Image: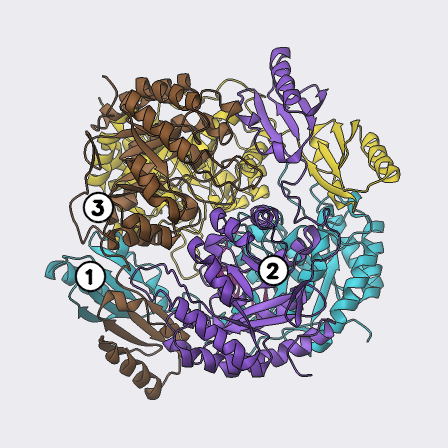
Chain colours: A purple, B brown, C cyan, D yellow
């Protein structure tokens, strides 16, 4: 940590800070330039969070040198985390397609979609059973009934299930049905939920909050790992910007950035990332080319009758076309798309 | 709702949409221009949410005409909501100052602060007992012990208590101690929490999410009112933008915008809104001038030793100076600052 | 254009608006719902810009139905624009790599780089001769001397030259040396510069402004086409967001979005788009997969000695490695990378 | 400047960097922690811009300690700059109102507006003669004819004139007519224009670019001062964010931030800052309370017939009402609104 003092700070101010830093167990280096006095402090990274030296009136700024995360960093674990889920691995050579409707609306809707995406090459089935929505007047999900349909679809198709948990009180229930627990974008910093999910022995997919920086996102994953759950994957799903043509701005640069800074796998969601089904295929291809370890995509048999997100859902025929394109691309990238019969 | 069809759409496409709209109970008006065909649909506002006509390939865009919120709108209730809390009213002529530490750290820290802000003219005491933090390695709050100290401070000073509820499982507990329940920025769209808080008979202050639009924020308040809690106030606390000099960008234009569109009171938080204590006083003055019904400000006896947000906390002497400035300003604005002895 | 009137607007208000619209040559349709009165107006798209009906106190909002651009739209020209430049075409099947230093620093630096990128498969040489910089204390470019070095490099290597014009007074000068004129991000809405460049018979690459929406960007291209220059290509180079790990947020969704809305080619700049050379290769691959018609990338023989943008410049060996990856990828995408010997 | 090396950097890497820093005239301090090696470098601030050490693969990050601006900083000049223009001073005790139409449309429109704002208490007349617009199909300004009308209005009313210069070729012409030259938001980083304006002996108002950080804005002012023009004032006019209810997000925290970091005056433009005339009055009041040295506001006799920005223009009667409110407020703030007869 580097502390820059304001022009004109004297001995008394320097003394006060260095004393306080030493009390907290930091080693202190002093550097007095012509224009600025700079104090370097070396010590326990986890105590850095609690110090708030910028509150002192004569401190101009405090510059952290070490990243605030540890367990998620590649420095902590140089080799890639490979998550095993049934017959699949995420984070290794395989690339996976997770597909299905935004919300589980009915047994028939879900089973029809599940069979369609399975045939086209998906390996995971997505679908929301709990759907807190922007409007209180919108459909709010089938809840446990939806989870049962997901389990039935798994039995019929062999697809594994990824579904979102939104309420701390439902973590155990959802974990009974799901193969991967999804933490949604709005809950990325719902730290109580993160703590509960950390206790469960299930892989977790952590979506990026719409206004979360890379560092905040990695800190949310640190919560999960610090709580004991090491099977964490990130999911880039777009951030909120001034551009309104797309629902969000899909920030694919996060894929190589996370691969550089962390050992955890990275999934991309081009459906929420664009909000327009016409853009899903090109952005899915771009995500694979950027190095994504998997994709999660919305598919609905009749998008215009979907209770949510129809605008960004592919029809089964369009999904099949996309899978053919992706399969060819993934071969050229030497990362086979698991589930597609070559 | 206006539906614009793509260039080249024919009778079959128009027929399909109009049939579907009529099935859902909408009245339909057709307007065929030279370049575009436009369909107007009039009907139940709450069913608009469920229609996803943009999923149809020949629909160019759908433009909603009615706002998606109802209960929070000034059209629904033309006169201002005035919330009565003990001897105080929020949303009427009075302006209130809510002040205190970011987190309740100890009994002595809280009581010292409470007395100081009371003397200077605050009417509400703020302080967090549950503090989920960006880092799992940071202080996480005193929990119920913190709530008890808040109650003790209320008894000693007469200040009423505003404190945040962060977990659905704690709503009843926090409501036993608090006079106003605060919903934090990260939880603005935690709809399960909104539903639980809606059931409690306590006023609620709803902070704006860091990337929430005005409309999304009003929809979150709609959840509270739809759930039965009509004593809702908004709190502008800054949004996330590209500017990093300030912690957030305090969007004061929301104060007059909300007063135009809604009947609910608006509070402003210049501490989180700027992240720098030096900017708190000028932005507090600006907030009052923009028409805020109250302010919420962080005060700490020793900001540089605060476990959180020290950088944005005022010392008691600086808080006192600010209150003198605000008192004079509020007189010129004909909205007395309750609690200040003139 | 749809005009929504405020609740409570009466006959007089409706009369005033319809009269004014008719005076301007619009056909008017009136629709009076229970809650809102809506007026539809059909007429000359270019006069829509001048009407400012939202200034009327009883108008709630005005919703444009037609896009404000015309010549750049795919509705105006359904087939792709293919720009011929010497032996190359941009916007057809070929994909092109434009590479070179941020700034032309010296004859030897430029020639060394030009030969290196030529060997690796680039077809265009980039390099700035005029470099207005954020700081007045930074290097500002070699000006015409730099243009002469670019011409010399073209002669020696056969690479065509793309370079930026920043001052209206230099348009003719730069056009004498360049094969493509680049309009930089900061000048996207420098309409005087756009007008001058429109008069020159040279292809233009129009970079997206860091806070420009898709529509504003297309309007800037409309200026060029309206001024008589039809050989326009877009260049996505990232937008400014809250994320600071990358210099900008590269918005690859603009590639398929522009291909849907416009007939003009789209180039991607992953160097400025990320600001980190480690991210250039993965994002270059992603750009091709998203459908880009070309890439523009910064290469410098000694990035750490570059006068600008060293942090985002590839070394020649890294550039060569990237070209090998891109070549393989472009084959799988059926769009050969021109210049690479297979 | 602090240079943080990547984990695992050895003697050779440290040697290479320190040698290079010493060659450039920097003094070097080395600090080797357990996890990171840190190099401190002290030297000429203007050469810092040219070093690009982050291009080295073993450098993790470079943290500047000194601000890149000098002349605009309060450290360089501790006392406020007070700009004298005719009988007025900007940056001292007086607060000024600059008012008028967005564009000069005709002699009668301008003169009518000028007389109206003069009577209400404005001291400067604003009005654009050159109007480059987002659409090539919109009105582009009366050019020199418009400047002549501004001069005539000055003669009739005594109001001084502020008007925008947009083209380097027009700087001298505009300077002949104007009392203050305005540099518009889109031109904040048009460095050629800044250099030309710096040569003219007229005060300059520098608007903030819609995506400019505080530091970039101050660097643009540094260009003007470095070029010899010391009579510079900033103008906050809102930044581009995700919020679309307002045209821009007016960032009033910049007023006290600039007053802390710089000695130059700060003006606020609530018209562009909100884009809605209904929000102009409350935000004008907020700007004064935040410490603004002046306001610039759009007024039009018939906003709904304005060729531009009618939606954000006040009518003369509304302007007069606002001036009465502002006058009372400015008295309570001890900064008299010049031009208002008390």
Query: Image check: B15 left or right of D226?
Result: left
Against B127, is C328 above or below? Answer: below
Residue range in magenta is: C211-235
Mark 3: few/some/many CA within 10 Å (<14, 14-19, 20+): many
Which quadrant of the figure contains the N terminus of chain B? bottom left
Q: Chain of mark 2?
A: A
Q: How far apart in space, not on screen, are marks 2 and 3 (Cα)? A: 42 Å
Please name whichever residue, A129 or D163, is drawn nearer the observer in this view of the structure: A129
Report helix, strand or loop for mark 1. helix
The answer to if C226 sits in the magenta stretch is: yes
Query: Image check: C186 left or right of B78?
Result: right
Q: How far apart in space, not on screen, are marks 3 and 1 (Cα)? A: 29 Å
Please name whichever residue, C97 or D178, is drawn nearer the observer in this view of the structure: C97
Residue at mark 2: A252
Against D341, is D205 above or below? Answer: below
Report helix, strand or loop for mark 3. loop
Q: How far apart in space, not on screen, are marks 2 and 1 (Cα)? A: 47 Å
């Amino acid at each position: 940590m580097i502390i820059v003092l304001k022009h004109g700070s004297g001995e008394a101010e320097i003394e006060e800070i260095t004393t306080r830093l030493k009390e907290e167990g930091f080693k202190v280096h002093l550097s007095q330039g012509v224009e600025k006095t700079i104090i370097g402090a070396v010590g326990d990274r986890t105590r850095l969070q609690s110090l708030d030296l910028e509150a002192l009136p004569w401190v101009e700024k405090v510059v952290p040198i070490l990243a605030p995360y540890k367990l998620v960093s590649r420095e902590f674990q140089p080799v890639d985390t490979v998550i095993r889920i049934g017959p699949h691995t995420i984070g290794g050579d395989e690339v996976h397609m997770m597909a299905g409707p935004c919300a589980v609306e009915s047994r028939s809707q879900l089973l029809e979609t599940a069979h369609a995406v399975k045939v086209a090459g998906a390996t995971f089935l997505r679908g929301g059973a709990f759907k807190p929505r922007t409007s209180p007047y919108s459909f709010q999900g089938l809840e446990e009934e939806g989870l049962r349909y997901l389990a039935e679809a798994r039995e019929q198709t062999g697809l594994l299930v990824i579904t979102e948990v939104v309420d701390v009180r439902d973590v155990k229930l959802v974990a009974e049905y799901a193969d991967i627990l999804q933490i949604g974008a709005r809950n990325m910093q719902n730290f109580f939920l993160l703590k509960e999910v950390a206790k469960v022995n299930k892989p977790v997919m952590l979506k990026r909050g719409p206004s979360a920086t890379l560092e905040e996102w990695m800190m949310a994953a640190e919560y999960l790992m610090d709580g004991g759950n090491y099977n964490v994957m990130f999911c880039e799903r777009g951030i909120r910007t001034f551009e309104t043509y797309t629902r969000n701005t899909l920030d694919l640069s996060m894929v190589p950035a996370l691969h550089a800074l962390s050992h955890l796998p990275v999934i991309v969601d081009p459906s929420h990332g664009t909000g327009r089904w016409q853009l899903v295929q090109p952005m899915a291809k771009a995500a694979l080319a950027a190095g994504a370890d998997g994709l999660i995509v919305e598919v609905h048999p009749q998008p215009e009758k979907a209770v949510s997100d129809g605008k960004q859902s592919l029809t089964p025929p369009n999904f099949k076309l996309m899978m053919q394109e992706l399969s060819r691309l993934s071969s050229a990238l030497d990362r086979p798309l698991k589930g597609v019969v070559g």
